[in-house]
Image: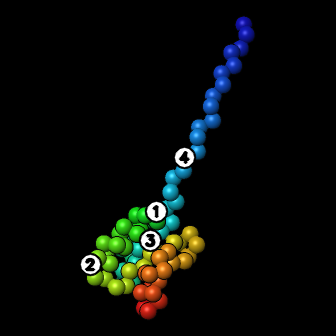
């Protein structure tokens, strides 16, 4: 009996967005879990449109503010 060789293709690497962002409003973190950058921006935009002026997006992976417009608000507090 001879063995059969089956070639399996290596699965393609799925490029999933990294979830390392969080949103703070008025000194309170408003997210319960880490977000992608686009999710964080969407949530922050809702608060900004509701006239909150102290909205911050943080990338906890590199500990820096994401949006320079929001950085001005965060640095005042």
Q: Which mark is residue 22?
A: 3
Mark 4 touches mark 1? (CB < 8 Å): no
Q: CA distance from mark 3 to mark 1?
A: 9 Å
Q: Which residue is mark 1?
A: 36
**Disc nearer the start of the sequence (4/3):** 4
Regarding mark 2 in the picture, which secondary structure is present there?
Answer: loop
Q: Residue at x 43, y 81 (%)?
A: 70
Regarding mark 4 in the picture, which secondary structure is present there?
Answer: loop
Q: CA distance from mark 2 to mark 3?
A: 18 Å
Mark 3 touches mark 1? (CB < 8 Å): no
In the rendered image, the quadrant that contains the N terminus is: top right
| Neighbour tally class for label 3: few under 14, some 14-19, many 20 plus, Cα within 10 Å | many
Q: Which residue is mark 2?
A: 50
Coordinates of residue 16 in the picture (x, y in percent): 51, 52
14 left or right of 35 in image: right
Can residue 28 be seen at all in this image of the molecule? no
Q: CA distance from mark 4 to mark 3?
A: 23 Å
Q: Nearer the viewer, residue 70 or 57?
A: 70
Coordinates of residue 51 in the picture (x, y in percent): 28, 82
Mark 3 or 1: in front is: 1
């Amino acid at each position: 009996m001879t063995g059969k060789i089956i070639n399996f293709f290596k699965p393609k690497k799925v490029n999933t967005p990294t979830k390392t962002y969080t949103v703070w409003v008025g000194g309170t973190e408003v997210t319960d879990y880490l977000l992608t950058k686009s999710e964080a921006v969407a949530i922050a935009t809702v608060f900004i449109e509701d006239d909150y002026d102290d909205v911050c997006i943080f990338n906890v992976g590199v500990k820096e503010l994401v949006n320079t417009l929001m950085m001005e608000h965060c640095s005042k507090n």
